[in-house]
Amino acid sequence: MSVDSGSHRVIVVLRPTVSGLDESAARRMFDAVRAGTDADVRIAYLDVASPSLHEELDRAHTDDVGKVVLIPVAVPRDRYLLTWTSKAVANWRETRIGAELEVSLHESETLEAAVAAQVIDELGAAGKPITASPASYRSPAWSVIEQHDTHLLVCKGPRCMAYGAGPLHRAMSAAAKGTSAKVTGTGCLSPCNLGPLVIANPGGTWFGHVDAGDAEALVSGREDRLADNVLDR
């Protein structure tokens, strides 16, 4: 696909797994793409990681970009990534009144075949001996619960990320340093239209529509400052 530079920007959209993303590998791929083209290319994540697609679309609008082409990348083809990329764009348009930005989606028809061809080429490879130790499966470091009095779960599903869960998670993690609070980002917790969502344990209190400005209160357990954010279950 040829892309003109100027007011035209391409955003490669990735979807991390529940366990996260090898960001160094994603960065190497992204750097290789940028090295091979003069086009304005950026990277965004549908959920879990940052920058989110909403953040990159906001940046494109601020930079006065006229047109953005989104290229979701996943092998094998990920229908969820394609569907929710489109839904994220629809939400961005609805919530950014007056933002003039043409956004389109390009679905590669050759990526899977190219990867399959590469795998076929590698079938005759001898491989390298596996020398990894099994010690990590019995390491004491992975057998002890980290000391904490409060465990805060931050939803980082696609909708919560659109509503600001990325900055919220970063702010809460920073606020938790040196405290007895543990902050963990999660996949979708389900009622994401009430997001960003945080669950505070012990107690299992759900908070909705919180933002980075609420990080200190969430980490310190100041629920009195978050009375309007407590969700009924």
Image: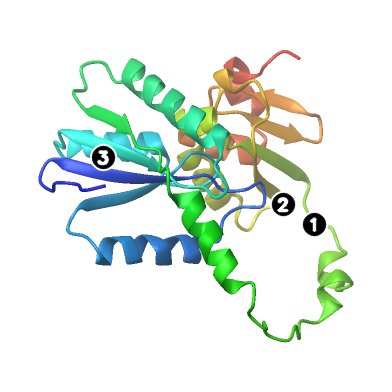
The image position of residue 152, as x and y in percent, is 69, 40
Q: What amino acid type should be assigned to the residue bearing mark 1? A: Gln
Label 2: few (<14), some (14–19) or many (≥20) C-alpha neighbours in 10 Å = some
Helix, strand or loop at mark 2:
loop
**Label 2 close to label 3 by CB (< 8 Å):** no
Labelled pair 3, 1 in contact (Cβ < 8 Å): no
Tell me the residue at 61%/52% (across/down).
20
Location of the C terminus (image quadrant): top right
Q: Nearer the viewer, residue 194 or 112?
A: 112
44, above or below 207, in the image: below
Q: Residues within 10 Å of mark 3 (few under 14, many from 20)?
A: few
Residue 139 in the image: x percent, y percent? Answer: 85, 73
Which quadrant of the view contains residue 201? top right
Give the Cα distance between marks 3 and 1.
Answer: 39 Å
Q: CA distance from mark 2 to mark 3?
A: 36 Å
Residue that badge 3 annotates: 59
**Secondary-structure class at tag 1:** loop
Residue under label 2, please give it: 180
x, y percent for residue 214: 52, 33
Residue type, numbered disc 2: Ser
Task: Tell me if I can see residue 211 in this picture.
Answer: no
- The residue to which callout 1 is attached is 147
Q: Earlier in the sequence, mark 3 or mark 1?
A: 3
Tag 2 near tag 1, CB within 8 Å: yes
Q: CA distance from mark 2 to mark 1?
A: 7 Å
Query: Which of the two discs, 2 and 3, sits closer to the camera?
Result: 3
Is 56 left or right of 134, judged from the image as shown?
left
Question: Tag 3: residue type?
Answer: Arg
